[in-house]
Image (cartoon, rainbow, N blue to C red):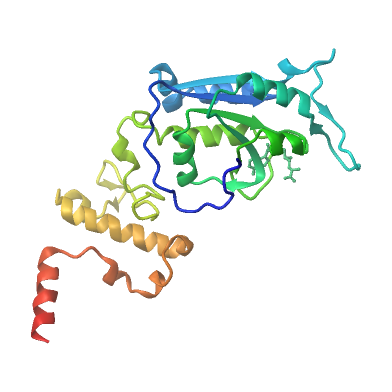
Amino acid sequence: MKHDHQDAPAAPEPSNARSGPLRIDLLTLFPAMAEGFLKESILGRAVQSGILDIRTHNLRDWAKNKHRRVDDTPFGGGAGMLLAPQPLFDAIEEIRTPGARVVYLCPDGRPLSNTLARELSRAPHLIFVSGHYEGVDQRVRDALVTDEVSIGDYVLTNGTLAAAVVIDCLARQIPGVLGDDQSLVGESFDEADGLLGHPQYTRPADFRGLKVPEVLLGGNHKAIGAWRKEQRIRKTMTRRPDLLPPGFAETPPEAKKPKTKRKAKREKSEGAEA
Ligand SMILES: C[S@@+](CC[C@H](N)C(=O)[O-])C[C@H]1O[C@@H](n2cnc3c(N)ncnc32)[C@H](O)[C@@H]1O
């Protein structure tokens, strides 16, 4: 069954019940485009440490003709070529394991989000299908694809980079992939509040007269937490009000600040007096 196109809030799902690595297969005409990316940095380390098992495949390996051709012209005419069904059917049917999700990257798919990435990261096995030219024969999408994912409202020449983006995004949701899983807390689109991230600074505290906000230097973690939250709210209101709950923008930012204990106590006693 194809998964719902709507990016509804994540239904509570059991956390990753896999005992081994997450197996990811990528079917593409351009394996080299993804291989370098998937070997580097955090993803490379996740593969080395056995959290991810990523396999890239050249779709042409399943072509059955002399020239390893995998495309053909569209019925009904029109510009461009389409990836034909036979190599994709053969490849997916060979690679697929029970419970695998077959993800086709396409501009008309479900928009990628952290919520969707988290959902995919819990699958037992993922197969990414990268399109090229005008895309793939619709019968592949109807019969084999379980998820259709778009990385944005624009059109790329092929889906390999899009697959790499989705793999990167879902991998960092898997415990152990990031050096510190706390990195996910308070960053943009944090599942707890959906806000954008706060500004960050490192040494020196004064660079060419550009100073780090005083509050971050004092070591008062409560005050730092309150400042960060306020910055996140302000930034989200300015840049992405669509991420906020309805009516939120009408509330003055001061009213949204996390209250200090003293302030809460004062408000309570004022309320009791009134
Ligand atoms: C030129 S595009 C095909 C566009 C297609 N004819 C359409 O109108 O939607 C070629 C391939 O690039 C990939 N692609 C392009 N834009 C994408 C996006 N925004 N998100 C994910 N994949 C994309 C898909 O795999 C697609 O099959």
Q: Position of residue 179 (x, y in %)?
A: 32, 29
The total number of labels drawn is: 0
On-image quarter of the N terminus: top right
Residue 203 placement: quadrant: top left
Residue sitting farthest toward the top: 66
Q: Is residue 80 above or below residue 41?
A: below
Q: Position of residue 170 (x, y in %)?
A: 47, 36
Say whether residue 82 is left or right of residue 173.
right
Residue at horizontal 59%, vertical 20%? 56
Q: Is residue 40 above or below residue 66?
A: below
Say whether residue 126 is left or right of residue 52.
right
Residue at horizontal 17%, vertical 50%? 221
For ligand 1, the image quadrant comes to top right
Residue closest to the eye, 55 or 101: 101
On-image quarter of the C terminus: bottom left
Residue at horizontal 14%, vertical 69%? 264
Q: Position of residue 257 (x, y in %)?
A: 26, 65
Residue at horizontal 39%, vertical 54%? 194
Residue 143 placement: quadrant: top right
Q: Position of residue 266 (x, y in %)?
A: 10, 74
Residue closest to the eye, 98 or 239: 98
